[in-house]
Image: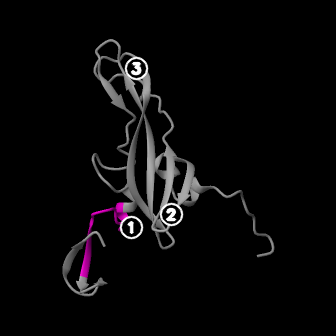
Amino acid sequence: MADATFSCPDLTTFLGLDGLGLVAVGQRLEAERAVVECRMPVCVEDPFCKACGAQGLARGTVTRRLAHVPVGWRPTQLVVRLRRFSCEHCQRVWRQDTTGLAEPRARLTRQGRGLGAVGPGAPVHVDAPGRPGVGGGLAHGQ
């Protein structure tokens, strides 16, 4: 490996967040999980009202929490800050589109769902008492 090239550490790329349209802006490591704060860049169509087509005004942010692919042995939670918009013309309120990130009302990112990440309270396959993947039942929150 004499000619190995290294780049600056990049949490966004390391976690695969760029494929979801997110940018990591902060992290907190806790004993039981890693928490990563993310932002979603505003797309061209986000600020425009889907009902009347008028340009909306930014009205703060909302937070969406999603389980993501584990980092090492730690479950990973994404705290995604999304911009809210409102239309002065028709009074409609909306937030940034997250359909590329996760299904509506889902608790797992698309990548987390594909790799079997487990969110809080999600069913876990348990085959033998206390041993995941050995028998045939479901246990919750393990």
Q: Which quadrant, please, contains the C terminus?
A: bottom left
- Pointer 1 residue: 115
Queried whether the magenta region covers residue 66, the answer comes back as no
Q: Secondary structure at mark 2?
A: loop
Q: Amino acid at mark 1?
A: Leu
Residue 30, numbered circle: 2
Q: Which marked residue is nearer to the observer: mark 1 or mark 3?
A: 3
| Neighbours of disc 2 within 10 Å: few (<14), some (14-19), many (20+) | few
Marks 1,2: beta carbons within 8 A: no
Horizontal side of 49 relative to 57 (left or right) equals left
Q: Is residue 52 left or right of residue 17?
A: left
Q: Judge whether residue 116 is colored magenta.
A: yes
Q: Which residues are magenta?
A: 113-126
Residue that appears at 32% across and 25% down: 93
- Locate residue 11 relative to residue 58 in the image: left or right: right
Q: How many marks?
A: 3
- Asked whether the residues under the numbered discs 1 and 3 touch, taking CB atoms below 8 Å apart as contact, a structural biologist would say no
First in sequence: mark 1 vs mark 2 = 2
> Farthest residue toward the top?
89
Say which amino acid is labelled 3: Gly
Question: Nearer the viewer's eye, disc 2 or disc 3?
Answer: 2
User: Around disc 1, counting alpha carbons within 10 Å, would you say few (fewer than 14), some (14 to 19), or many (20 or more)?
Assistant: few
Residue linked to disc 3: 56
Secondary structure of residue under mark 1: loop
What x and y, as percent, mark residue 43?
47, 33
| CA–CA distance in space, label 2 to label 3 | 38 Å
Q: Name the residue at 45% across, 68% down.
A: 32
- Residue 27 is situated, as x and y percent measured from the top left of the image, at 55, 54
